[in-house]
Amino acid sequence: MKLEKKGYSLTCNEKGFTWLFGVHLKGLSLNYNQQIPAPNDTLPTAQKAIYKSLPNTPVFACDDLAIGINVWKFWDIGLSGFETEQLSLHLVNLPNYSNYCGLMGSDDKPEEKANPNKDPIVSLFRQLESYIGKAPNHLEMRQTQMALTDTTGTFSVQLPNTLFKHKELSMQLLATSEKVNSEKDKKEYRRRRKSDSDTLPTTSKRSIEFVLQGDIDKDDLTGHVSITPSKNQKFVSIPLVLNGLGFQKADFEVNELGESFGAIHADLRGGFVGLQVNDERISDTLVEVDSANGRFVCDIKDGFFELDSQSSVQINHISANIFAQYQGGNNPKYALNIYMPRLKANNFFASLPVGLFRNIGMPQATGTLEYRFQFAIEHEKPRDCILESKMWPSKDFTIVKWGNVDPRIINGEFTYTYWEKSEVVARFQVGESNGNFTRIDNISPDLTRCVMRSEDPDFYHHQGFYMDAFRSSIAQNYSQKRFARGGSTISMQLVKNVFLGRRKTIARKVEEILLTWLMERRGLVSKSRLLEVYLNVIEWGPGIFGVTEASRFYFHKNPIDLNLGECTFLASIIPMPKKVRWFLDSNGCILSNNGHFSALRRRLLAKDSGTIDTAIFQVCIHPDAWARIKGPAKKRDTTEIPYEVFEEGELPLEAIEQNEHD
């Protein structure tokens, strides 16, 4: 009667008993009798189509259902067996229509008061442990289908054959997602593709299919499972993860899982063979790893997680120990340590994932490498974060053969190509044959000083990486909860500009770091030459490349003749060269609220206040430049000043917001 009042009807064609204590039902069906309403006119066309495509099928149906009850443990009754044939479950949740909400009971039940002394994670584990303990020792499901439809589309799972018997498990699975692409999805897709012509279809369909086999002990929650491709497939493809994850085989093992000292303790192992990742955020080419596996020993409870230092990961020949910790509360703390023991350099390079280093290729080397990474941050003290990353090469470490890129070409004349949206915007020679090339000794010392103060204060002292800048970047990004600034040094920017292009992917950043380390560690290019090339190739405004073009365009001067105020202006626009009009008034003069210019001026005055006439910072570009300058108009009335300008010490003022050049 309760079901009928809620609009449901339950039917069963045949009833009986099975096993010693069990029931056997045939032709079981649960229907929701409310008619599917017409979609609201305000809904997008794709969502309206969902209403029209809904099949007139029962909420639940099963041709044959047998359930056995285990009563021998009368104090803890569970299931002894569970068998189904042709079971289907289709849940629908749309505006003004849901075929299952009425089955979920009343919302008027009094809420259970939370016990402050009861750990919710431990409590949840105990409940799951209890449910699994009551699960049947024999489970067999044939031709099972389940689906959920809502305003985002339909997600369905098909289980042709599932069998669990005497701890052995085998299962075939096919999961399909038909997602309605919203305008937000389409906009993000065009942004990533950097083209308005590329667009997503109305719906996107993705599927996962694999075979799972293994053994599971439901009493102590240990076991092992393997995931392999279905017939006629070479890979298991999981497009819902990272937009495209695939592998030839996956193995997972639970060696220990239970309560220990008020927390859940787990000792897990797992790995992949033939791992593939296809995600444009990671790389614009397929990333492949022959073998990846690890051991993870962890403890978890409410507000606490720790990955013990016994944990390790291995990617091909590279193995590393990992420690990670999270402490919650009013002042959360995070920590991560990685240590790679000494390894032959050739094995290290050969083990790096294929596809992550498409641009630079893999070098061949002699000697060995050792690596350590340490990171820790406290919520209330982000500026005191710890960040250390160091690679130790052996004394005999040498690159005997470069891959696709040899950074030593920077020492001579070479061709520089500037790419934007996969198109060549500029191409020119960097060297004496180019009339716009200016040697470092013919550039105003004030300009080199301003550029280094802005971009890389420790340029002449570090080996490619300025850790204080990285720490400051992490602190600012963490505090503002967005990517507000980067930490790239002049060396890193030059490597990216000359060898790697502007595509923002994890692969490009990894290549940038590796090539910078190889170049700077052995001093393959002098600091003076790096700075000289940097000043001659970077963009100083829309379509303006190199210091000679910039000084002549903005001030009708040669680089050697620039004064300190003009140099400060040029250095201040490096992070956002296409937005130069943001920082000028209608007469082409520097706005008083130009945050980056003001911060750099303040820093210069702090160093040399007694010798600088502040009037020199009243800078206006040449009228011809103001008439010809391109780029977007000023977007806002004020330009925020990065908080780090108030700190003591030399840190780069790299970004007012996310750098264009980073």
Image (tube, grey):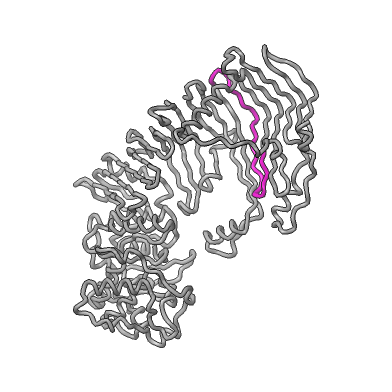
Location of residue 638 in the rendering, given as x and y in whole percent from the top left corner: 43, 73
Q: Which residues are magenta?
A: 147-167
Name the foreground residue: 67 vs 276: 67
What residue do we see at 25% from left, 72% from top? 449
Asked which quadrant contains residue 262, the reply is top left
Q: Main secondary structure of the magenta part?
A: strand
What residue do we see at 73% from left, 15% from top? 17
Name the foreground residue: 251 vs 430: 251
Location of residue 530 in the rendering, given as x and y in whole percent from the top left corner: 27, 66
Residue 574 among those drawn in magenta: no
Looking at the rendered image, the quarter that the C terminus falls into is bottom left
Name the foreground residue: 401 vs 31: 31
Residue 150, relative to residue 554: is it above or below? above
Q: Is residue 434 visible?
A: no
Asked which quadrant contains residue 4, the reply is top right
Looking at the rendered image, the quarter that the N terminus falls into is top right
Q: Is residue 649 left or right of residue 150?
A: left
Location of residue 609 in the rendering, given as x and y in whole percent from the top left corner: 22, 76
Residue 380, relative to residue 636: is it above or below? above
Q: Is residue 119 left or right of residue 36?
A: left
Q: Is residue 183 left or right of residue 578?
A: right
Location of residue 615 in the rendering, given as x and y in whole percent from the top left corner: 28, 84
Residue 102, relative to residue 594: is it above or below? above
Name the foreground residue: 115 vs 403: 115
Residue furthest bottom in the image: 623
